[in-house]
Amino acid sequence: MIEVTEEAAEQIRSLLGEDGKLESHGLRMKVVGGGCSGLQYQLSFDDVIRDIDHVIESNGVRVIVDEKSALYLAGSRLDFVDTLQESGFKIENPNASNTCGCGQSFAA
């Protein structure tokens, strides 16, 4: 459903490890309304898994996605980049018909 690159997995493990939450939390990926293209991504760390959530293991990290967001994120790839031009998590979403310049907002 969602692929997490090794670079993204390393960054997730590092951030969770700094807070002592490596074993208890996963990365929640969510799609919410907003942004210049209509929908935007939300990433957060969460230790609550609800009945409507899907849990995916990829490259040794847990990714939590609710049912509604899963429709928009199916087939996506989460990467982490750190270059002179950009730094942070980057989502490559095959379901996005249009994206904004910052990459945080999209239309489907």
Image (spheres, rainbow, N blue to C red):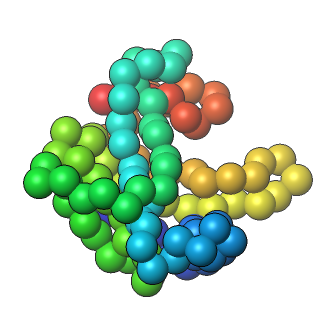
Quarter of the rendering occupied by the C terminus: top left
Which quarter of the picture shows residue 72? Answer: top left
Quarter of the rendering occupied by the N terminus: bottom left
Residue beneath the point at 59% across and 74% down: 20
Q: In the rendered image of this protein, does residue 38 appear above or below residue 88?
A: above
Q: Can you give x and y, in whole percent of width and height, for residue 63 in the image?
A: 36, 64
Q: In the rendered image of this protein, does residue 67 appear above or below residue 20?
A: above
In the shown orientation, is residue 103 left or right of residue 94? Answer: right
Answer whether residue 71 is visible to the viewer in this image. Answer: no
Answer whether residue 27 is visible to the viewer in this image. Answer: yes
Q: Can you give x and y, in whole percent of width and height, for residue 53 in the image?
A: 19, 54
Q: Residue furthest left?
A: 51
Q: How many marks?
A: 0
In the shown orientation, is residue 27 left or right of residue 1? Answer: right
Q: In the rendered image of this protein, does residue 53 appear above or below residue 32?
A: below
In the shown orientation, is residue 39 left or right of residue 14? Answer: left
Q: Can you give x and y, in whole percent of width and height, for residue 28 in the image?
A: 39, 54
Residue beneath the point at 36% across and 42% down: 30
Residue beneath the point at 31% across and 48% down: 73
Q: Residue furthest right?
A: 84
Which quarter of the picture shows residue 7? Answer: bottom right
In this view, the residue in front, 6 or 16, is 16
Q: Residue furthest bottom?
A: 60
Residue beneath the point at 52% across and 76% down: 22
